[in-house]
């Protein structure tokens, strides 16, 4: 008699845990912080002092008013680049501080 175990693949179990605990989101934010220079370029990254994420909003602190003003015109492009970098639509709005 064969026993029927509810077996799932390890990768599926890990993916489910990541989703339930929102670890995939936390990992994506970590990846954005580490890959910020590759996403926006060296000059902008140099003037970025802090990156935070909450509920679809990416908060980026810029230490230069000139760079902040430049970025305000490129918000949609940056959101698209960040989402492409993450492989999913994580960021809905970019808030520059």
Image (cartoon, rainbow, N blue to C red):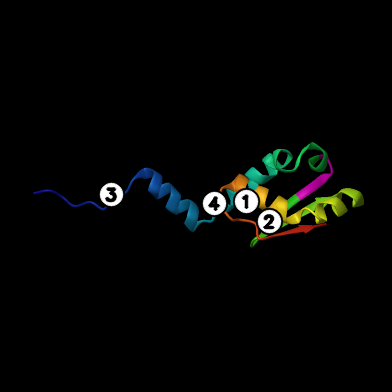
Q: Which residue is pictured at 66% across the width and 45% down the height?
A: 32
| CA separation in Å, label 2 and label 1 | 13 Å
Tally of marks: 4
Q: Main secondary structure of the magenta part?
A: strand
Viewer-nearest of labels 4 and 1? 1
Q: Residue furthest left?
A: 1
Look at the image and give the residue range highlighted in magenta: 46-50
Residue 23: image tag: 4
- Residue 62 falls inside the magenta stretch: no
| CA separation in Å, label 4 and label 1 | 17 Å
Q: Residues within 10 Å of mark 3 (few under 14, many from 20)?
A: few
- Secondary element at image label 1: helix
Left-right relation of 40 to 83: right
Q: Nearer the viewer, residue 71 or 15?
A: 71
Tell me if label 4 and label 3 are in contact, CB under 8 Å.
Answer: no
Looking at marks 4 and 3 on the same chain, the residue that comes earlier in the sequence is marked by: 3
Q: Give the quarter of the figure containing the C terminus.
A: bottom right
Viewer-nearest of labels 2 and 1? 1
Instruction: Name the residue beneath numbered marker 2.
Output: 53
Looking at marks 2 and 4 on the same chain, the residue that comes earlier in the sequence is marked by: 4
- Secondary element at image label 2: strand
Looking at marks 1 and 3 on the same chain, the residue that comes earlier in the sequence is marked by: 3
| CA separation in Å, label 4 and label 3 | 23 Å
| CA separation in Å, label 1 and label 3 | 33 Å
**Which quarter of the picture shows residue 76?**
bottom right
Instruction: Name the residue beneath numbered marker 1.
Output: 83
Q: Which residue is pictured at 34% across the width and 45% down the height?
A: 9
Q: Nearer the viewer, residue 80 or 8?
A: 80
Q: Which residue is pictured at 81% across the width and 45% down the height?
A: 48
Left-right relation of 53 to 9: right
Viewer-nearest of labels 1 and 3? 1
């Amino acid at each position: 008699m064969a026993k029927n175990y509810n077996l799932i693949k390890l990768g599926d179990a890990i993916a489910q845990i990541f989703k339930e605990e929102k670890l995939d989101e936390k990992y994506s934010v970590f990846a954005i912080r580490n890959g910020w220079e590759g996403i926006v370029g060296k000059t902008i990254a140099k003037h970025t002092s802090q990156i935070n994420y909450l509920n679809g909003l990416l908060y980026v602190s810029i230490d230069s008013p000139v760079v902040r003003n430049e970025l305000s015109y490129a918000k949609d492009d940056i959101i698209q680049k960040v989402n492409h970098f993450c492989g999913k639509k994580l960021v809905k709005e970019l808030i520059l501080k």
